[in-house]
Image (cartoon, rainbow, N blue to C red):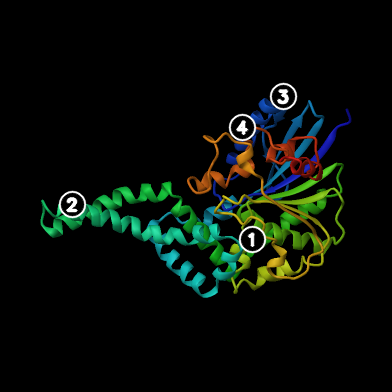
Amino acid sequence: MEKFKRKVFYLGGFDPRGVRFYHQLYREQAEKYARLSGEQVEVSARRPGPASSAIWTVTNATAGVETDYEFFRWEDLVAKVWIRNPFLLAWRSVATYSAHARFMQFGRMRKLRRGPVITILYPPILAILIPLGIALLTALLLWTLLPFWAAALCGVAVSALLSGRLLNKLIVPWLLRFMYYNHSVAAQGPGPEMDARLDQFADRVLTEMDGPYDEVIFASHSNGTNYAMSVMRRILEKRPGLPANFTTLTLGQVVPVTALRKDARWYHADLKALDDKHFRLVDFSSPPDGAAFYDVHPIRLVSDRCAARVDLLSPRFHLFYEPENYHSGWSNKYEAHFDYLRVGDRLSPVDYLSLTAGRRTIDEAIAAFRTIP
């Protein structure tokens, strides 16, 4: 069997965990893929890559596939803006939602998808109501036994002890950090360090694009899908004609979070610059995922035309998980948002491991996926 060679570039989201976590996640999912498919899949140790990247090799001996996997790193920049102090996070959230009230096109966003609007709005509401509710309930219960001032102090103490855990379980602090970061980026741009990093990422893709590969995939997930559009602008400005075997893959895309800010003019320009460019774009975003925008064309957010060949698809996770294992978007938003990088209880032609370690090209995988009732 002639070897099928693939190059994958991966740009992740707003996550300080970085390459170690994602390499281990890929290894775990590769083991699951191998069990379900019966194929022999091995994932090498990670090694430093050029520029700001890490590399590992995925070998599927059964299918004759070798994938050179390059992880684009920016977790160091995430760590610099990752707010740990809850009081500072609360203060920054006030500025964030004040700016959203002025600049975010919530009406237009709601017409696109209602779920992400709820996901954006519930963190500040819960961040106020949960501590306040716990404090008041505790104070009222103790008021029958203690003076009011003592009951109030006990209520504040109990709230401080319990509300943080409950808010963490509901992913409120993570979402507040995510929203503050994207507010800052929308208003001020990525900043010099991230701009330089995006230049490096684009140059890496350009360097490898014509390598000895049967397929080249530029994959991004979550907040990485925002920056993927900026990377594509850089790539297409330097090379308007892309190889036929190159695909931009977005997973759980959140482009409207920045694109629908009226003050994000730099980002509008990035998206507008793509409207006359010919390239292949595939998006998988799940309707139950309240942290992603299903069936939203990123370029058409700012332009009436688009020369790219675009597929906007749902991964239909519910078909590939047993009901007890399915990460419902409402009961477990955080885990549901990472299902794009996982293998379910049954293999899908378009799960991430099938696309990056299997024999099919993306177009072949999508064709197989469309035959599923």
Q: Quadrant of residue 233?
A: bottom right
Calculate the distance from the C-alpha at mark 1 to the C-alpha at mark 4. Answer: 29 Å
Residue under label 2: 141
Q: What amino acid is at disc 4?
A: Asp
Instruction: Give the structural element (helix, strand or loop) at label 2.
Output: helix
User: Which badge, 2 or 4, is on the more N-terminal residue?
Assistant: 2
Q: What amino acid is at disc 1?
A: Val
CB contact under 8 Å: marks 2 and 3:
no
Calculate the distance from the C-alpha at mark 3 to the C-alpha at mark 4. Answer: 14 Å
- Residue at 11% x, 53% y: name it: 146
Q: Point out the frontmost of discs 3 and 4.
A: 4
User: Which badge, 3 or 4, is on the more N-terminal residue?
Assistant: 3
Is residue 126 left or right of 158 when viewed as pictured? right
Residue under label 4: 345
Q: Quadrant of residue 40?
A: top right
Q: Residue furthest front?
A: 373
- Residue at 61% x, 32% y: name it: 345
Return the residue nearer the eye: 292 or 231.
Answer: 292
Residue under label 1: 255
Q: Is residue 191 visible?
A: no
User: Which badge, 1 or 2, is on the more N-terminal residue?
Assistant: 2
In the rendering, which numbered label is found on residue 38?
3
Crowd band around label 1 with a 10 angstrom C-alpha radius: few (<14), some (14–19), many (20+): many
